[in-house]
Amino acid sequence: MSNAILAVNSGSSSLKFALFAATRQSGEWSNEPLVSGKINGIGRKPMLSEKVNGKPVEISGPLKNIPLEARHGSLIALILERLNSHYSKFNLVAAGHRMVHGGSEFASPVQIDAEVRKKLENLIPLAPLHQPHNLAAIDAITASMPDLPQIACFDTGFHRDMPRLAQLFALPRKLSDDGVIRYGFHGLSYEYIASVMGETLGTVADGKVIVAHLGNGASMCAMLNRHCLSTSMGFTALDGLMMGRRSGSLDAGVVLHLIQQKGLTPDEVWHMLYRESGLLGVSGISNNMKILEESTNPHAREAIDLFCYRAMREIGAMTAILGGLDALVFTAGIGQNSARIRQQICSQLGWLGLQVDADANDRNLSVINAAISEVKICVIPTNEEAMIAAATCDLIAVRK
Ligand code: AMP
């Protein structure tokens, strides 16, 4: 029986899991999972898709027809049962979790005990869309397998050594001293891209690179020598780019206006900024980019244009911070799949030396810049689960 690590990535309405061999072959970690799965549509129409050694498998048992009321905790319990019955040749030795916020205390992966769990729970107000689901997954595994080591891996970790100016808000010093600073998110995705981008970019990977993680949540990271110099998300994952349902950066005066003049409660403002804004709010149609691309409604078009405009503006700002640009990397659902969005963002950056090769872009190739482009443009699929499992493997030192 071979030792395996379960990586768990629980998002607001999805739950990804992946089982990796708990070993490094000659020191090299394999980013290919043995088994991987994703439950989409939690709370609406949950559905599991699963792959074994990269090939889709038929779903049977209780996860074939998931009840509508199932949430992250109960789903994790079902996933553990399924792994035990279908993949019993693997001996689970640890579980690693994506933990969205580590606050000022946690940057590196940490083993979860009662004290750490309590501290992570205290950070819920800073990541209300994700942290409760991350904790529910931990609790469900504790309930089924109390002795299994569980490791929290932080989305904020990659950005913790950002220069101080990139972390500060122009607020009274007391607030910064209290931890009201820019933390940045999607760190596991950036860490993964930083670890593999040399395969696509060669030595350019060690230069001035902007990684655009464009999914339902969207952010960018400016990297120099694969370290973060600046990132677009802030104290919370509400800042920065326009997202599926989140507004991204906003004049704080709008929040005051909504409360003081429009009489909205803080909870109503929360709901508006986290759930009703972004692509959904501007289009009035959907938070789903694919649906908007297929729509002929002018409001869908305007939402897409604003999404691309904001991305283009962020790339300009990050290029200034980097003092130039060697490569732009697209990743996550929109970044990996939407040739139209990549084209539209880059088409506004010709002055910076970016030229897309339309054919390579349409075919979703990994290098999509034209030969004459002064900046390399790439598409690299992210793999947060591999990063979680590798960190978990190292922390518990379960190498064969
Ligand atoms: P993620 O949060 O990384 O899973 O990304 C989800 C987003 O990717 C949604 O807005 C999807 O509509 C978008 N997406 C996935 N595939 C495509 C595609 N082929 N074209 C356009 N958008 C896509």
Image (cartoon, rainbow, N blue to C red):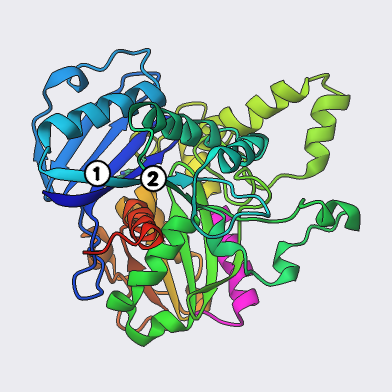
Can residue 196 be seen here? The reply is: yes
Q: Earlier in the sequence, mark 1 or mark 2?
A: 1
Q: Identify the image quadrant of the C terminus.
A: bottom left
Provide residue 68's location: percent of width, then percent of height. 34, 13
Indicate the secondary structure of the residue bearing disc 1. strand
Which is the main secondary structure of the residues drawn in magenta?
helix
Look at label 2 and name its amino acid: Pro
Provide residue 200's location: percent of width, then percent of height. 29, 75
Look at label 1 and name its amino acid: Leu
Say which residue appears at 52% left-offset and 26% top-offset: 284
Of 155 and 330, which appears nearest the observer? 155
Residue assigned mark 1: 92
Say which residue appears at 11% left-offset and 33% top-offset: 86
Residue neighbourhood size for the residue with mark 2, other residues' Cα within 10 Å, grouped as few (<14), some (14–19), many (≥20)? some
Q: Is mark 2 within 8 Å of ligand 1?
A: no
Residue 36: name its quadrant: top left
Residue assigned mark 2: 149
If the picture is divided into quarters, which one holds ligand 1? top left
